[in-house]
Amino acid sequence: MENVIISPSILSADFSDLACEIDKVKCAGAEWIHIDVMDGHFVPNITIGVPVVKSVRKSTDLVLDTHLMIENPEKYVESFAKAGSDILTFHYEACENDEKVKSVIKLIKDNNIKAGISIKPKTPPEAILPFLDFVDLVLVMTVEPGFGGQEFMHDCALKIPMIKENAPQNLIIQVDGGINNLTAKICRSLGANSLVAGSYIYNSKDYMNAITSLKQ
């Protein structure tokens, strides 16, 4: 079975003891840490900014998988790259045209980190097919971005096979939203090789058991 990268979302972690929470999921088998950045404009919530990413970088050697749910992502690419992000994923919907999408991808790459592109539930997969050869990761949202703990939208997961069919072999296809032991199986069966889980992991009593269950 293909290895699945588990990226716990710290949106559901205890922020009063974030370094410890990150260390716990690392010990439990997590390879990445998913950092949700929200600006209150592109999505209705406000979360983490550059200073938190910088602090997280100091506290862990795990891959920092930063998801920009923000307007004008190009303005913040350099700051989040310098803060220590290893992967920077922006939203297709935050760009007014394909040229803007290409310019954001180039900007991320010029900062010597990996580039990801994400689509919201209502965006068809066809929209991002032209960019698959230029990014390292595609993030399929299976909830409306903005809040943790939402229910998994099955229709959104059905975008995965088309992306996989048109993607280069080494593309990471990540799914975020309502991931638990049951929905993880659906996503993996459709071709996903990275899963973001927040509340499922951080609300569990046994992080290792939760992470292992997402891979089985």
Image (cartoon, helix red, strand yellow):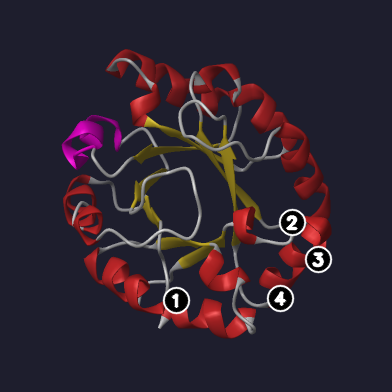
The quadrant in which the C terminus is found is: bottom left
Q: Residue furthest front?
A: 44
Give the foreground label among 1 and 2. 1
Residue 214 on the magenta segment: no
Q: Earlier in the sequence, mark 4 or mark 3?
A: 3
Q: Amino acid at mark 1?
A: Leu
Report the Cα–Cα distance between label 1 and label 4. 16 Å
The image shows residue 42 at horizontal and vertical percentages of 46, 28
The image shows residue 155 at horizontal and vertical percentages of 19, 56
Q: Residues within 10 Å of mark 3 (few under 14, many from 20)?
A: some
Q: Amino acid at mark 4?
A: Cys
Q: Amino acid at mark 2?
A: Asp
Q: Which residues are magenta?
A: 123-132
Instruction: Check disc 4 and report the residue beneath it.
Output: 27
Q: Earlier in the sequence, mark 1 or mark 4?
A: 4
Instruction: Check disc 3 and report the residue beneath it.
Output: 20
Give the foreground label among 3 and 2. 3
Q: Amino acid at mark 3?
A: Cys
Report the Cα–Cα distance between label 3 and label 1. 22 Å
Q: Earlier in the sequence, mark 1 or mark 2?
A: 2
Q: Main secondary structure of the magenta part?
A: helix
Report the Cα–Cα distance between label 2 and label 4. 12 Å
Instruction: Check disc 1 and report the residue beneath it.
Output: 214
Residue at (36, 22) in percent of width and height: 101
Q: Earlier in the sequence, mark 3 or mark 1?
A: 3
The image shows residue 23 at horizontal and vertical percentages of 76, 67
Q: Residues within 10 Å of mark 1 (few under 14, many from 20)?
A: many
Q: Earlier in the sequence, mark 2 or mark 4?
A: 4
